[in-house]
Amino acid sequence: MYNYKSLLLMLTAVILFGATKADAQTVRGTVVDDETGETLIGVNIMLHGTNIGTTTDINGEYSLTVPDREGTLVFRYVGFVTQRVQIDGREEINVALDPDIIYGDELIMVGYGLQQRSLVTGAISRIESRDIEQAAPLRLEQALQGRTAGVTVIQNSGQPGSPATVRIRGIGTTGDAEPLYLVDGMPVGGIDYLNPADIASIEVLKDASATAIYGARGANGVVMITTRQGSPGPIQVNYTGYVGFQNPWKETDLLNAPDYMKIMNESYANDGSTIPFPDIEDRIAAIGEGTNWQEEVFFYNAPVTDHTLRLSGGTETSTYMASMSYRQQDGIVAEGKSNFERLSFRVNSNHQRGRLDYGTRVTYTQKTTRGIDPNEEFGGIMARASNIDPVTPVFDEDGNFASSPFASQEVVNPVAFIDVINSEWNEDKFVGGVFGNFNFTDRLSLRSTLDIDLAYGSNRTFTPVYDLGGNVFNTTSSAFQQQNKWITWQTSHVLRYQDQIQNHNFSVLGGFELLDSRNEFLGGVAFNLTMESFDNAWLSVGTDEENQSNFGGMGLESLASYFTRVNYDYDNKYMLEGVLRVDGSSKFGPDDRWAVFPAFSLGWVLSREDFLRDNDVISYLKLRGGWGQNGSDNIGQFTYTPLITTHAGYGFGMTPSIITGAYPTQIANPNLRWETSEQANIGLETAFLDHRLYFNFDVYNKETKGLLLAAPIPAFIGNAPPVVNGGTVRNRGFEIESGFRQIMGDWRVSLSLTGTYNKNEVTAIDNDEGRLFGAGVSTSMDHVAMAMVGKPIAFFWGYETAGIFQTQEEVQNHVNSEGVVIQPSARPGDLIFVDHNDDGQITAEDRVKIGNPYPDFTMGFNMDLDWRNWDLNMFWYGSFGNDIFTGGTRRHDLPMPNWKEDVLDRWTEENPSTSHPRVTIRDPNGNYTRPSDFFIEDGSFVRLRNISLGYTLPPRITDLAGASRLRVYVAAQNLLTFTGYSGHDPEIGAYGPLNVGIDRNIYPQARTVTMGINLDF
Amino acid sequence: MKRITQIIPLVGLLLLAGCMDDFLDHKPPIQRTQDNFFQTKSDAEQALYAIYEVLTFHHGRQNTGFHPYDLMVNVLSDDAYGGGSGPGDQPDIVDFNEHNISVTNDKALGLWSDRYTGIYRANLLLDNIDDIRFENEQDRVVMAAEARFLRVLFYFELVKFFGNVPLFERPLVAADIRMEQTDPGLVYEFLVTELADIIPDLRDVVPPAEAGRASSWAAKSMLGRIFLYHRDYAQPVLGAGPLSVSEGEVLGHLEDVVNNSPHRLLDDFSALWGRAGNNNPEAIFSVQHGAAALSAFGDWGFLNGSFGNWASQMSGIRGILFDATYIAGWSFQPVTPNLVEAFDQDTDSRYFLSIFDPVAENVTHRPEEMHQWQGYAFKKFYPRRADLPSVNVPFNWPYNRPVVRFADVLLMAAELGSPNAQDYFDQVRRRSYGDDFVQIPATRENIMEERRLEFAGEGLRYWDLLRMGLDTAAQKINAQAIQDVPINFRTDRLGLLPIPQSEISLSDNTLVQNPGY
């Protein structure tokens, strides 16, 4: 009997069986390395959810039989990011895998060696060459800005060649807080000679356990730069270059001529004096808006160009990298007088012969710079442009530079002054080194290096005869020349032993290093030149025998060090590291020459434990912590001994002749030693979803002791006090580094976010005042920056205001607790000052902290977006909580400088403003002469630092030219800036440890648009 | 073989390690240190000149500035008010004039620290001078004597201003913060014994090329000054003990100056002043301010580095438009009408040369810009167009300030009871009044009055007032009070300045404040 059900069953079985057998499909393809294009052998490919899989063969090809062309293929390879690709019915699927550079077992540079990233127990941040390329930095420090947590980078100004202030984990000293820069292991004084395209990676060592191996120089952090090396293979040629145009990103809102005259008239009228522009209507009719001085001094569309050509290649035993680059940049202020040019060559080579590895790193750079003072309130170009009145034209009727009848002192025609600046710096720098690494056995090796840094610098300045009005005049032409030579050599020898016993891995290194650094300088000035031009301005052209002068001398310092480090880990899960470094420096007093710096740190890679080993979500989890001490030897070369100084300060005789007296500069302190920094750090490193998402978090506390101060001795001792180690500063904060990357078909996105929070506080100052006085502004605002216990270094110290008096009655009612009228000379419209010590007067004792120039929090956000051949990159940088002291206006000592537009909201009887006091020249209340919070503005900003859009031409086109890759791109720097600050630029750097964040009319940053290409052969 | 090639580099490294100290020891290449200084005569000269230089210091260790010796002393007396451009301009000077000097007064601290700087440099040289190689032993003797002379000057000014000061003869080190003040009597004893000691060592003849260096006549004259001040003030007011030097000895020295020194009374009072008057024969010892080629100086950051006479810059009046003779200044120490009226303006030739009356001389000026202006300024060191420095004007006025001059020696000898007292007194007055001279007896009162007229503006009046007795001083000084200028000299303060409070704190409270503060 036909059973209906069994027929159905048989049919189903047939169908199923047939489906399985008949629909067996093959998927094939090739897997390559996305970065190099090379095929990858042994890549593991699985059909997700099954145990069907295969691996790629020697040609990188695979062929996988799958039931149907649905589902997801998972491509896994050590050192590469796992990829999941939907089959989507395709027969051929070619995959390019990304090298896994975020977290894994890659090696990173630590002091004197390399260590696997997962085993590192210190706080080290790393930037790759790709990030540096994308930053297309004008200065290398800009590549660090926002991409590494804990590192604050502030551009000192927008002038080409202008340095950046780099601070790692806060300011640890009232002296020089520069971190130690090492390029291929050699300490260098500055990194502006480096071509950023030559750099392979930058490691920033932040906590004491990482920096302790640099001992007496590690207290401010260490920036380790490694230059590119060649790799075996046929010669590779790479060219990158761009051209661009720069413009000021904003113009400060200054008054135009009609408003200026109106305000001036009102100022004088408020004082009861004669108004300067009684004929204001006629003048407005004659000159209209007046002169926009900012426009006159800006150089619009200032060009910038950069080209690098690199050749690299080699064999299994010998590789090389040679590069040549040229950069030229004009500044956006003072056309022709503010520019930068650099030409550099580099050859790096590595060789191997038996047990010996050796190599060289050699570079030569030539630099030429012309510059103006970028942040100076008296004679700076921007200062003059902001203070001079808009009534004066640039040229007068005769075609000469006009001089202003209203401006005085240094405020003269800035365009005329640009004409008078003639100064040039040249530098030739050669940095070279050789190294050798000899492997005695598999376990024991010795690495020796010898490096030299030789630089010649020269500066030549020509000052013509000129008279621009005010006090800006020069009656004799002069030529100034200065030559400098710097030579530093360093040699280091490190013995390394590593071994493994069952699961115990350990390595020990012991090393010894010598460093010697000298500089010689020579210079002179001659007057009354026979030929008055910059080209002829040399010392021999001067004719004034009596007044010419010369100077010359040298400085020198040496350092000798011993260090050792022990690393131990058990099964790559539990790590321990100990470091000891002993430094002897010629800068320390002879009684205290040798400094000892210990550090230790621990780590635990939880993700290698059994309970997390195969976790799907958490792919990496490490906890680490460390403590260490290191030092700062930035204490000057002979500070421990009282030097004899000579001074020509008296004269004898009927026709007097000058005599020179000599005396010791200060009382001695032979115990002068280094500043010591002690830091504790705890960090958590995590990665999720196959390292696609990572999150690192660090918390630290850093105490720096022994800051250099003048000792508190009474005046009757009779000489300047000795420099002693007498202050302490504390920095504490946290850092976040996080990132996410995802591949979705043809789209690839990579995001990263860093954040830094640092709180700085001075905890002791042991000098006679208990505080340190910092920089002032112009002639009347003294000590705007201060250092005091309980406050951050270089905080702003001034009067606190409490609004504006609206009526005379309010003036009379502003009394202290005893009923004394605090500001008897005030009138309605004047600022109300707070009498903090309640003594009925406004004096220096009422000054308090009114601002902090350092940001509370800085953030960087980077986004990479790739789609087929297109790539888009955006990098945002934000700084929050930094205050700026606006010190650029000369209102307090000159009667008629220009104003910013916010003065239009000033207090008048019709406009009872509460934000801007009345305008007055006499200013009996000191609205404009007292440094108060009226001059403090919030300098927080968010900048779109970089944005670039690139297109990589398809291979069929590039093959025609014989090239392997051609990418064209457009990019912009500082395209957008969001800030409430009213001045030229919210990025004001440090011009001294107690001179930070004071805007003296800063040379602004430029908004740059560039177009460039990357070409590889 | 392999083992040896392994051992050798290791041993080599160890050997290198032993030479480290040489590698790290550097001598500063362009500056001397205290260890290698003080070796040759040239070093001694430079150290000595560094002491002389302190005579021109007017700005304190903190560079806060503007307290020239003569100006501050004039302002303390009944000869001048504080002045300036307004109440906010150097209020510390106004406080001096009103005798309302707070323990934190910056000028007091500056006067204290400048003098101690000179003392330090002198002590340093004297401590090291025996180690120096001199070809001519006489040079060592003379230089040591000059250093001691200058040290005496500095201590004398300190003990006059502050009364109770620490006295020490060695250069102090950083650990010496707890120095106690010395009894004033012992300080005066030190001063006179030092002078008595060095008088034979100092030179009698100073070559014109070295004019300005101390001579034995300078020491003798200062001995008179110190003796008189001790007799009339330190003993009665401070209770200082008697000196080991007798009045007869001192008088003998003064007579020696009168009779045997190359110094004399000039016939024409005007020849004493102006740049042409620098180092004239009547000036026995002057602070030098007038070098010709020092046009390069002008550093607002290092005011004590300048060489010119700051009292000149500070006393000029304001509002002078172009004038052929006079230059404008900062209008400090405006003269009191009391001093002006003390002169017999018609007959005393000193009046026109000591007091500047711009109204009478038809010089445009702006009284409204000058604080406490009464119509008169001091003229002896007044900045004049004929002496205008070519650059850095405020730093370089070339007017020497006499510390002691021949006329003073004559009057001191008269005060000490010389048998020629009347003659000396007449000489001084005859020079001033010329044909209008009328003899008056050389009584103490007349001598004091004559001193006021003779030395107007030279920084001597205040000390003379104190020598006349605290009550007299109080009466004369307080009589100058006018509206808005409440002058209140308090006798309980004994005419002394307060010890600067910062010094007391920094000495760990070893120093004790002066009475009345």
Image: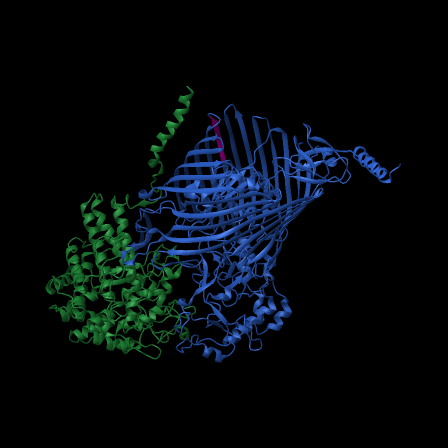
Q: Quadrant of residue A51?
A: top right
Segment tinted magenta in the rendering: A431-439
Residue at x 34% of width, y 51% of height: A724
Q: Residue furthest front?
A: A1
Image coordinates for residue A363, horizontal then vertical, percent: 53, 35
Image coordinates for residue A344, horizontal then vertical, percent: 56, 38
Q: Which of these two is toward me, B51 or B435?
A: B51
Q: Colour of chain B?
A: green
Query: Split into 4 quadrants, where in the image is the N terminus of chain A?
Result: top right
Left or right of A931 on screen, residue A640: left
Q: Quadrant of residue B131?
A: top left
Provide the major secondary structure of the magenta segment: strand
Image coordinates for residue A72, horizontal then vertical, percent: 71, 40
Q: Is residue A757 above or below residue A452?
A: below
Q: Colour of chain A?
A: blue
Image coordinates for residue B449, horizontal then vertical, percent: 21, 74
- Residue A738 appearing in the image: yes
